Amino acid sequence: MAEETGRFTRSVLKEEDRKYLRNLPLTATVFVDGLHVLMCHAVPSDPLFEYRGEDSPQWQADQIAPAVNVELVGHTHIPFQRFFGRRVVVNPGSVGQPKHGRAEACFAIWQDGKIMLGAVPYDLDRTVEELRRLPLSSNVCEDLIFVLQNGRAPASP
C-alpha cells in the first residue's frame, strides 16, 4: 500500500511541492504555554520510520533534550498518552488511516495545559467513493478500504 500510494502522491505533487516537503525539518521544537514541545512523524531517534507502540520501554530511554515536556509523535496511527514524570508522549492517532480498531478520525486537542485525545466518525461511504476514483490497483484500493472500515490493517497473506 505504502509504495503504490507513494507513487500516486509523487505523481500529483508539483516540483515546488516536492521541494517544499524535502526542505521541511525532520523534527521541530516549539514553545507553547510555557512548555517545550518536540514534534516528529515517528519517534525522536528515527523521525520518519520507526514504528513504536505505546508500551515500548524505548520511550523512556530516548535521548531528548531535558527541557522537552511534550513529545508529539505518530506513525503507528494508534492514539495514546504516556507520562514520564514531567514529560508526556502523545500520539493523536490518524485522521485518514485509523489503526485503533474503529472507523473514526482521531485527533488531539491541547487546551488549558491539558491534552485530550478524541475520535469522531466521518462519512465513510463518501471517503470510499473518493478512494475508488483514484488510479490505484484494485488490491491496494480494497486494502485501504479495509483499513478505513475496520480501523486496522488487513491480515498479511
Image (cartoon, grey):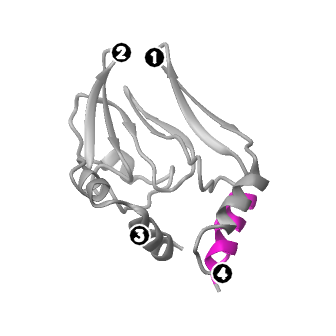
Q: Nearer the viewer, residue 114 or 110?
A: 110
Tell me which label, 3 or 2, sits earlier in the chain: 3
| Mark 1 vs 2: CB contact within 8 A | yes
Residue 103 placement (x, y as % from top left)? 73, 52
> Which residue has dot 4 on it?
139
Q: Amino acid at mark 4?
A: Asn
Measure how far apart labels 1 and 4 are at the Cα level. 44 Å
Q: Which secondary structure dominates the residues rendered in magenta? A: helix
For residue 43: magenta?
no
Mark closer to the observer (1, 4): 4
Q: Secondary structure at mark 1?
A: loop
Mark closer to the observer (4, 3): 3
**What crowding class fits label 2: few (fewer than 14 Cα within 10 Å), some (14-19), or many (20 or more)?**
few
**What crowding class fits label 4: few (fewer than 14 Cα within 10 Å), some (14-19), or many (20 or more)?**
few
> Which residue has dot 3 on it?
11
| Mark 3 vs 2: CB contact within 8 A | no
Residue 79 placement (x, y as % from top left)? 57, 44
Picture quadrant where residue 152 is located: bottom right
Q: Amino acid at mark 3?
A: Ser
Measure how far apart labels 4 and 2 are at the Cα level. 46 Å
Q: Secondary structure at mark 4?
A: helix
Tell me which label, 4 or 2, sits earlier in the chain: 2
**What crowding class fits label 1: few (fewer than 14 Cα within 10 Å), some (14-19), or many (20 or more)?**
few
| Mark 4 vs 2: CB contact within 8 A | no
